[in-house]
Image: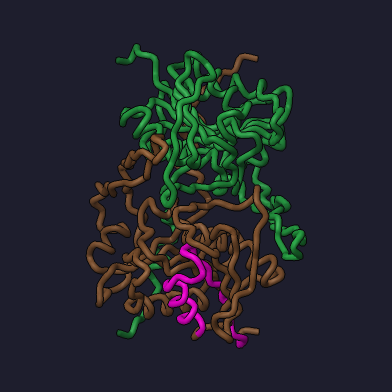
Chain colours: A brown, B green
Amino acid sequence: MKNERPTILVVNDDGIDAPGIQTLLHAMKELGNVVVVAPDGPQSGMGHAITISRPLRLDRVHIYPDVEMYKTSGTPADCVKLAVNKVLQGKKPDLCVSGINHGLNHSINVIYSGTMSAAVEGAIESIPSIGFSYDDFTYDADFRSCVPYVKAIAKQVLEHGLPQGTLLNVNFPKTNKIKGLKICRQANAKYAEEFDERLDPHKRNYYWLTGVFQHNDKGEDTDVWALENGYASLVPVQFDLTAHHAIPYLNTWNINVES
Amino acid sequence: MKNERPTILVVNDDGIDAPGIQTLLHAMKELGNVVVVAPDGPQSGMGHAITISRPLRLDRVHIYPDVEMYKTSGTPADCVKLAVNKVLQGKKPDLCVSGINHGLNHSINVIYSGTMSAAVEGAIESIPSIGFSYDDFTYDADFRSCVPYVKAIAKQVLEHGLPQGTLLNVNFPKTNKIKGLKICRQANAKYAEEFDERLDPHKRNYYWLTGVFQHNDKGEDTDVWALENGYASLVPVQFDLTAHHAIPYLNTWNINVES
């Protein structure tokens, strides 16, 4: 069994035609048998949305003769559910990789990211899972500098697995020469939202969500620090959101409910 | 300043006309000045989606003369961003409450839940935030048993705040007589997905996502245990997803990248 080529599920949130997922699937073909399930259009900012009030489409697409590829009308998290349940008929892949995202998913972006939601969904399914993102949101992003790291990290995870309940969030800086890989924590940063208010042709208001990134976390152990200093960042991520440290304090509360 | 009535932001994911948000806003009117920003239709399962590729609508609605209410085309997370930035003009509310959701958001549902994504967004904005959910997903759900707990917990949070980076996920069992409130951790549980496959009138396949809840976590300190035993559950939730305990192990990795 150990000598069989591993099955690698490749997903993303930018859609099946994105150069980022093409780069990722070609890198993974060197390590195993690749199955791709990706959205039929862009799904950025979808967070961990799942599709429960609409039916889903799932259609085979033929781009490369040696890669089984499907597109779906669903979200990135749906892609993983459909892959495991319908495409692989319940057989768990050995690895789930998501991306390479056109644009970074460091710090608080892990919460909003469709790329990371697919990787989280893989981890919930007990599949070793990694999200990859690159600091260039354009369609023409050049992912070549990321590829050696993508392969090395995937190889490591295939060999050694990941701690229970943990997945990886890997981000790459935009540089010809990545300095190395840093194991990091999620930086404490957020967006200051701004809404660009406009008038439609019928004189009704509408708003575009924009925002300015606010980063006041001075730590040198954060993903933002690593990326700003030319390193790739790797943050271990968990989907147990319990703030365990807050439980003893909350147990001191005296909630009186008259009934 | 301390004697002013607090400003309480009320949001949800079931939409502005849901009985759950009506119950919540009436409970909050006893504690402060209420502002409501809610989706103009159901947004369940939206996870932490935000709207970046479509413009957003935000319209005043007049239901109660003494409550400022708005509906939006956006997601639950968008509601909080719009409330803080446009409705309150940057003034932070003293409390953000989300729900009461028609349906439970215990265990892994915290990841998929629109109700909880709105509360998480509030916490990211440094607003003390609470999500409330009830074990009845029907429109006609009777929330009366929840109300005393909702008010007591909201009052406590208004008085004492919450630890930095922490929000609350509160779930109520369906019973006439809630036994009490338990401070819990998120149960380690998931869904076994099943896709209901059908043929459309044009003979093309489509799928409905369904799933069976799988709960193998025997701990008596979990939200699922509390709810199954007639208690309301309160889980402190964090949005730093770093699996800090995994960092020392990952630092033992030797990622060799030939370049």
Residue B8 higher or lower than A229, as above or below: above
Residue B16 at x, y = what percent?
55, 30
Rendered image quadrant of residue A170: bottom left
Q: Does the magenta stretch include residue A5?
A: yes
Residue at (36% x, 58% y) in the render = A106
Residue B64 higher or lower than A43, as above or below: above
Image quarter of the C terminus of chain B: bottom left
Q: Nearer the viewer, residue A209 or A162?
A: A209
Q: Is residue A97 magenta?
A: no
Residue B91 higher or lower than A13, as above or below: above
Rendered image quadrant of residue B82: top left
Residue A102 placement, left or right of B195: left
Q: How many marks?
A: 0
Q: Which of B221 and A121 is in front in this view?
A: A121
Which residue appears farthest toward the top when viewing the image? B3
Query: From this viewpoint, is residue B101 visible?
Result: yes
Residue at (39% x, 19% y) in the render = B6
Q: Nearer the viewer, residue B27 or B41?
A: B41
Residue A55 higher or lower than B234, as above or below: below
Residue range of the region highlighted in magenta in the rendering: A3-29
Residue at (51% x, 45% y) in the render = A242
